[in-house]
Image (spheres, rainbow, N blue to C red):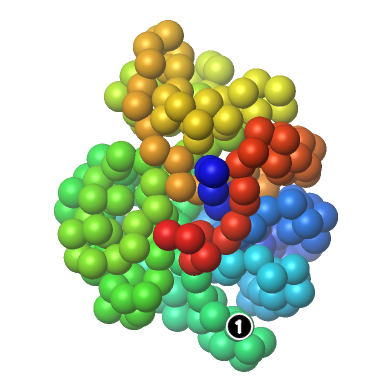
Amino acid sequence: MYTVDLNCDMGESFGAYRIGNDNEILHYVTSANIACGFHAGDPSTMRQTVQLALEKNVGIGVHPGLQDLVGFGRRNIDISPREAHDLVTYQIGALFAFVKSEGGKLQHVKPHGALFNMAAKSTRLSEAIAEAVYKVDPELILYGLAGSELVKAGKKIGLRSAHEVFSDRTYQQDGTLTSRRLPDSLIENHESAINQVIRMVKEGKVTSLQNTEVRIQADTICIHGDGKRALEFARHISQALKNAGISTKKISDFL
C-alpha cells in the first residue's frame, strides 16, 4: 500500500488581489502551505486560510518566502545563511500565532519559490533553515525538494524531513526543477501530471526533459495554488491516486 501527502501552496491573496481558489482546493488536498506576508499573503488572509484548513482537517504548514511581493518570491536574492535563518523564524512565528489563536497546531515548514530552490543546492542555506525550524519546534516537519540539500540538512539536525515532488513542474537530469524562465517548465495537462505523479510514487522515477530516468522519492506531492488549472489538477490527481491504490494522508499521520 502506498501513502503520500498531497499539498498545495495557499493563502497567497494580498489586499485587494485574489490568487487561487483555496476553499475549493482544500476539498482535495491533505496539507496546506500558507504564505506569511513576505512573498504573498497578508494577516487577514493568513487567518482565513488557517480557519479553512482547520475546518477541512488539513495539515497546516508555514510557507516562508523571500521579501519579494512584486516577484512573488520567485526571484533569487543573495541572502546570507543568517538572514535565511531569521526570515524563516519570523514567518513561522507569524503563522504560529494565527494557528494557536484558532486552536490548531502547526504541522510543517516548506520554503517557497526561490528560497526553496536555493536551499535545494546550498548546504549553508539549508542548514540555516533547518536550524531555524528546529529551534522553534523540533516536532515540525521540514519539506524539501526530493533528494536535496534541504532534506539532508533537516535529517542531520533531527527533524522529520519529507521528500517533495511536483505534479505541475518538469525536471532536469540532476533532479532539480526546470527553471520557470525556460520553456516547458510547467505541466499544464492534468493527464501528464497524473502519469508523472503515479510513476514517482510507485516506481520512484521521473523522466527529465533530457529524457533520462531520475531516481526520486515521493513523500509529499505539490500542486501550485496559483496555477491556472490548480483546482482541476487537485481534483483529478486526488481521484487518480485513489484509483491507483495510493492513499492520501497529511504528512504527520505517516512520516
* Left/right of residue 108 with respect to residue 147 in the rendered view: right
Q: Quadrant of the rendered structure where residue 86 is?
A: bottom left
Q: Quadrant of the N terminus?
A: top right
SS category of the residue bearing label 1: loop
Identify the image quadrant of residue 203: top left
Whether residue 114 appears in this view of the structure is no
> Looking at the picture, which amino acid does disc 1 mark?
Gly
Question: 118 or 215: nearer the eye?
Answer: 215
Q: Position of residue 201 (x, y in %)?
A: 50, 35
- Tell me what residue is drawn at x 74 percent, y 52 percent: 28
Above or below, 105 against 238 in this view is: below
In the displayed orientation, state which residue is furthest to the top.
Answer: 211
Report which residue position mark 1 lands on. Answer: 104
Residue 57 shows in the view: yes
Q: Which residue is at 29% across, 66% downward?
A: 159
Disc 1 packing (10 Å; few <14; some 14–19; many ≥20): some
Quarter the C terminus occupies: bottom left
Measured from the top left, where is residue 147 in percent x and y? 30, 39
Task: Where is residue 62? Give x, y as percent.
Answer: 50, 67
**Residue nearer the viewer, 239 or 51:** 239
Residue at 38 percent across and 32 percent down: it is 216
Q: Name above or below for residue 112 compared with residue 98.
A: above
Would residue 225 appear left or right of 108 to someone viewing this image?
Answer: right
